[in-house]
Image (cartoon, helix red, strand yellow):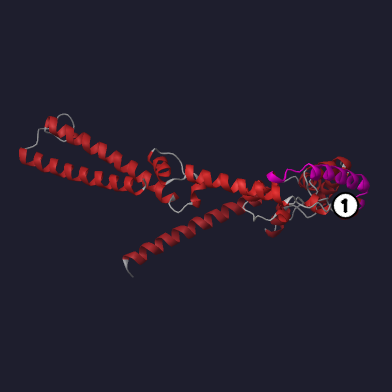
Amino acid sequence: MTMGSVSRMRVGLGLWALGLAALLAGCETTKKQCEETNWEQAGRSDGANGLSAPGSLLARCDAEGIAPDRAAYDRGHRAGLMQWCGRDWYTQGRDDGSRGDAAQDMAHIQARCTGVGVAVDVAGYRSAHRQSAQTYCATLDWRAVGRRQFEAGRPADAQAGNPAACAALGVRPDTYLFHAGYDAARSDKRDRLERQCAPRVVFDAGRHGHGFERLCDEVPHGRRAHDGGREHARLDKELRTLETERAHLHGTGTLLRQGRQAQPLPEAQKSAELNRLNGRIRELMHRMDDLARQFR
């Protein structure tokens, strides 16, 4: 077995051990949660949020073989669901419609709430939703819809951008305004790319220690220019250090790293050290110039 194989095996075993440790820690955390959870409160929280399926923690505890207190959970869930069913459904319908959201499945909700003895104002919800949705759709800014459609990375399809409530009411999109907004957003983004992601701008951001603008991932040179700027900054730091060493050697005849009490170097050694420093400085300057030219 080669040394490389042994090294890779050690790395693999190390990663396996870390993974096992993380798994065991996760199991311990789940076990602790299962043992300490107030199951009635957990059920109440799920019910109050309208969740019909048991909460994920309850399922995880089952999977770990740790039996939760299902009676307490069910008792809490029923109480929470009664609270959820007893909400002001007229206001809920108005709020859903005013956002352009599709109407909720009130038949399903009514069936669930009947099961816990709570009557739901289905007619009130539907009436409020329709009224507020009609107002919302009548005043809808189709330019803004088109802009949002582009910014979400979706195709220029006005019907696909039509809010669910408006589509349900049979409202047809204003395709002219939709595409005007979509195209304006696309033009704005193109301008931003040209302004913020020009090679020199991204290069300078890396050179000055600024973070990478994720928008610039969309241009081919983005990451490369930023990395080039960071490399330029690293080389510049090394260059300044070497120039300080060279100036010190010229002035004192000693090496900076040897401290103040060092004896001057013999002339031949001093000359050799200066030649080494000059060579490295020239090399760094050439590399920095190449980077700067590459991302002009």
Residue 202, percent from left and from top: 43, 44
The residue where tag 1 is placed is 106
Asked whether 156 falls inside the magenta stretch, the response is: no
Quarter of the N terminus within the rendering: bottom left
Residue 235, percent from left and from top: 30, 43
Residue 117, percent from left and from top: 93, 49
Residue 246, percent from left and from top: 17, 36
Asked whether 136 falls inside the magenta stretch, the response is: yes
**Considering depth in this image, is 102 or 262 the residue closer to the camera?**
102
Quarter of the C terminus within the rendering: top left
Q: Residue 41 appears in which quarter of the rendering? A: top right
Majority SS type along the magenta span = helix
The secondary structure type at the circle numbered 1 is: helix
Taking the image as drawn, is residue 78 in sight? Answer: yes
Q: Is residue 156 above or below residue 138?
A: below
Q: Is residue 40 above or below residue 251?
A: below
Count of numbered labels shown in the rendering: 1
**Considering depth in this image, is 79 or 91 the residue closer to the camera?**
91
Instruction: Tell me where the magenta segment starts and ends, as one range.
Output: 114-143
